[in-house]
Image (spheres, rainbow, N blue to C red):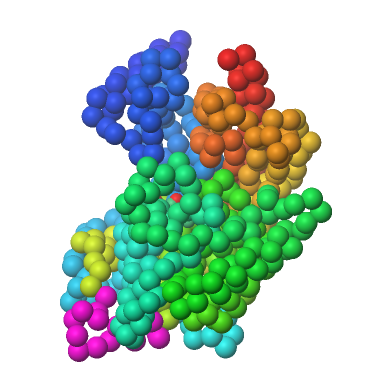
Amino acid sequence: MQRLDDIIARSDTAAAWRERDLAVLWHPCTQMREHLDPAGTLPLLPVERGEGAWLVGRDGRRYLDAISSWWTNLFGHAEPRIAAAIARQATTLEHVILAGVSHAPAVELAETLLSIAPREAGREPLAKVFYADNGSAGVEVALKMAFHWFRNRGIEGRTKFIALDNGYHGETLGALAVGDIPLYRRVYAPLLAEALFAPSPDAYLCEDGESPAERAHRAADALAALLERHAGEVCALILEPRVQCAGGMRMHDPAYLKRARELCDAHGVFLVCDEIAVGFGRTGTLFASEQSGVQPDLLCLSKGLTGGALPLAAVLATQSIYEGFLDDSREKAFLHSHSYTGNPLACAAALASMAIFEQDDVVAHNRATSQRMAQFAMPFADRPHVADVRQAGMIVAFELTRGGDKRTPFNPSARIGLRAYREALRRGVLLRPLGDVLYWMPPYCIDEDALQLLADTTRAAIDHAIEEAACA
Ligand SMILES: Cc1ncc(COP(=O)(O)O)c(C=O)c1O
């Protein structure tokens, strides 16, 4: 009885908290009207604390964080080794300007990142690290560096970036300019620098009888033609290796990146790999570029860099790019900065996170977990309305369409994904689909019971969403 009272009291607290929150907060990536709607179109989840793969709500219930809190969390919430590293650093040096100043966490992390970065035989390695404080800012750094490098050499005409259809690189105006997701981009289009877009190698778009590798080569042929048409105008190609995450967890064959690397070399264009979402073990290897045997000229990292504990981004560049900025002129320097560049707390969290990869043999552990995820996911292929089940390491996605036919997506107004989200949350799983794509991208510490819950809940959420939409 006492337990019941406790649950009721906590639920009241959760409801009161929602009111308090909505009185003052404007939440990211959210149509706030859906939160304010008394019908509960979009429920708000008040969270009290995190424990491993779980979030504990103010209602006292546990919710499985199946999306690693926007793909940031690697080893579970409140990971004690990362927490201890942050606490230690906080009592030593919490922050200091990085211009003209040096500190151990920034240097040690740079050394570590350079030692684990993708490497390609015969290519000059990534040799320098520039810090920013979130993924979009990291993308801005890489784009500006690529452009500025040519300027510094007196080459004025290389002003364009090539990006991929359906790609995503963040929300700041520069990053948005090389993104291709209409929902985020369309309204700001008049403000955005012009970019060139090449067809995505997305395997979901394979034509009848076409293999993912053939699709990748067809897309690479189109990239070759685009580079040819704009010879001498392009400074960089930016792409997400292996998985276009925000674009609906669309996956492609590693052959594409290999061809893209060759084409960039042939045209003297920098290759920027945005591994902000796919880096640090997400796709089965430490970095997704490794699966293509490719090393970029500029590598963008963020999200999992700190294990998901603190915001930080790192852009890794070759020595040649770095040397392109050495000059007597200050204008030729890379004068980009953020107040919190190289924040010691974030760097300490990242160092602890990198140590965990070794201590826990994370990539090997993930190999086993991703095999279990495959076993749980496979039966979904036979379910009605599931058009595609795809996986890259620790990412699994389910594409829902009418009758499971790729050519007949659900009408967006049916809000299938949102209906599934609500049902999953009711059952204790935080899923947050991308449109009508449901996906699993859990913290690496997810265990067998949680995987079972995830699979059961996903199945129930899909069935519920379809049924509810049919009745609406
Ligand atoms: C591939 C990719 N690049 C860049 C970003 C932007 O990162 P942030 O949200 O930290 O600005 C994201 C965020 O989802 C991403 O997935």
Q: Residue furthest top?
A: 1
Q: Quadrant of ligand 1?
A: bottom left
Residue 350 counted in the magenta span: no
Look at the image and tell me in which quarter the C terminus lies. top right
Residue 359 relative to residue 203: left or right: left
Q: Residue furthest right?
A: 209
Judging depth in this view, the residue of 110 and 30 nearest the camera is 30
Q: What residue appears at the point 68 percent right and 54 percent down from the top-left corner?
A: 203
Judging depth in this view, the residue of 243 and 454 nearest the camera is 243
Q: Can residue 149 be seen from the camera position used here?
A: no
Q: What residue appears at the point 45 percent right and 21 percent down from the top-left corner?
A: 41
Q: Position of residue 423 (x, y in %)?
A: 56, 24
Q: Residue furthest front?
A: 229
Q: Position of residue 351 (x, y in %)?
A: 39, 66
The magenta stretch is 319-334
Q: Position of residue 7 (x, y in %)?
A: 42, 17
